[in-house]
Image (cartoon, helix red, strand yellow):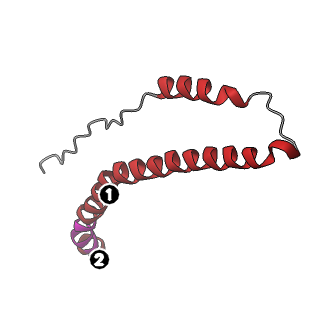
Amino acid sequence: MEEIKVLQKKGSIEFDYEGTKKILAELLSVYGGCVFNEDNLAGAKQELAALRSQQKEFDARRIEVKKEYNTVSEEFDRQAKEVIALFNKPIDEIKSQ
């Protein structure tokens, strides 16, 4: 029987992790030690909403990238299961004898 070959190439997602962390650290440093009270409560709520919005946007992009990346794996998995199922007929025939 000829060998069944599956070639795997390492996928990649380009993301400047360290650079992004550095930029965020600088941007978010303004919130360190902030004290909010009744006088600036409205501003605090606006800042909180803006931060949550940016976080949500980034998370949505993460999910989108992950889903796109996993599509290749899911397609291979589906095809591989079909190939594995092809073995069942001769296996069952031999087993029944």
Q: Which mark is residue 3?
A: none
Amino acid type at mark 2: Ser
Q: Nearer the viewer, residue 90 or 95?
A: 90
In the picture of the structure, the residue carrying the numbered disc 2 is 96
Whether residue 50 is in magenta: the answer is no
| Residue sitting at x 35%, y 48% | 69
Does 11 sit above or below residue 84? Answer: above
Residue at far front of view: 39
Q: On the picture, is 33 further left or further right than 95?
A: right
Asked if residue 97 is positioned above or below residue 6 in the image, the reply reads below
The location of residue 28, given as percent across then percent down, is 64, 30
Reading the image, the residue beneath label 1 is: 77
Identity of the residue drawn at 27% across and 69% down? 88
Q: State the image coordinates of residue 86 (x, y, percent, origin top left).
A: 22, 67
Q: Earlier in the sequence, mark 1 or mark 2?
A: 1
Q: Which residue reaches farthest bottom? A: 96
Segment tinted magenta in the rendering: 85-92
The Cα atoms of the two marked residues, 1 and 2, are separated by 29 Å
Q: Is residue 68 above or below residue 29?
A: below
Residue 68 or residue 20, whichever sits in front: 20
- The residue shown at (26%, 75%) is 97
Q: Amino acid at mark 1?
A: Asp
Tell me if 95 is positioned left or right of 5 in this view.
right
Q: Are marks 1 and 2 in contact (CB under 8 Å)?
A: no
Label 1's element?
helix
Closer to us: 88 or 29: 29
Left or right placement of residue 2 versus residue 29 in this view? left
Residue farthest to the right?
A: 38
